Image: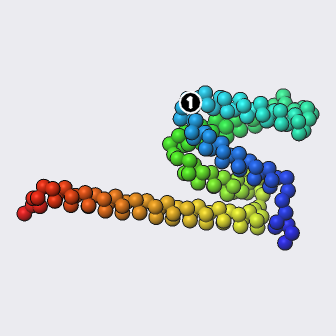
Amino acid sequence: MKDLFSFGTGEILTAIASVILAASTIISKVKVSKVPLGIYSIYRTGLGTIIFFLLALFIYGQNHFMDIFSPFLWKWMLVYGSIIVVIGQSCWVTGLRATNVSQASLIGSFTPVIAVVAAYLILGESPTFAQYVGGAVICVGIIISQFGIFRQQSLQIEILQKNSTAKLKEIEGEIGFKGM
């Protein structure tokens, strides 16, 4: 039972990253429509690279970059850079421009579930009981939010229909002619 409720460094850092990601999504949505996609991507990637480099130096020391010129590393970095960073970030920013913040946040809720599935498929890591429970809670939360959105849209449609019917009766009353 103790293992179900223990928090390690990974869990704490993941929670902090989630808060930062939420803030980043909101800030990006507000500002991204005013900046060209190419400039935004270059700035974000450059700033992220500098921050990562400085944090890696601080946390791991300069020996962390010992194999920086390894062909094996560069092969995988080119694959990772072109697929994950370029295609993934371009799709995310384009999608963020086309949606509102609440929808982007909802879509971001799938990230932990997708990460567990990818870890299973790519790395062969079997999900733990806690990950199953967490994934189920996330999926149930997404389903509940969709019911709320559907209910809100239904109410808005109903209000519009009532308003249009009342407006039509008002116009007919002013004209006085209701047809044959």
Residue of label 1? 35
Mark 1 is surrounded, within 10 Å at the Cα level, by few (under 14), some (14 to 19) or many (20 or more) other residues, namely few
Labels in figure, total:
1
Is the N terminus in the top left, top right, bottom left or bottom right quadrant?
bottom right
Callout 1 secondary element: loop
| Residue toward you, 150 or 30 | 30
Q: Is residue 66 left or right of residue 39?
A: right
> What amino acid does circle 1 point to?
Val
Q: Is residue 15 left or right of residue 36?
A: right
Q: Position of residue 122 (x, y in %)?
A: 73, 51
Name the residue located 46 percent from the left edge and 64 percent from the top edge. 151
Q: From where the camera sits, is residue 85 visible?
A: yes
In the image, residue 91 sits, relative to residue 138, either above or below, namely above
Q: Position of residue 82 (x, y in %)?
A: 66, 35
In the image, residue 5 sits, relative to residue 44, either above or below, namely below
Name the residue located 73 percent from the left edge and 34 percent from the top edge. 48
Is the C terminus in the top left, top right, bottom left or bottom right quadrant?
bottom left
The quadrant holding residue 134 is: bottom right
Name the residue located 83 percent from the left edge and 36 percent from the top edge. 55
Q: Position of residue 102 (x, y in %)?
A: 56, 51
Q: Is residue 52 left or right of residue 28?
A: right
| Residue toward you, 26 or 147 | 26
Give the farthest residue toward the bottom. Answer: 1
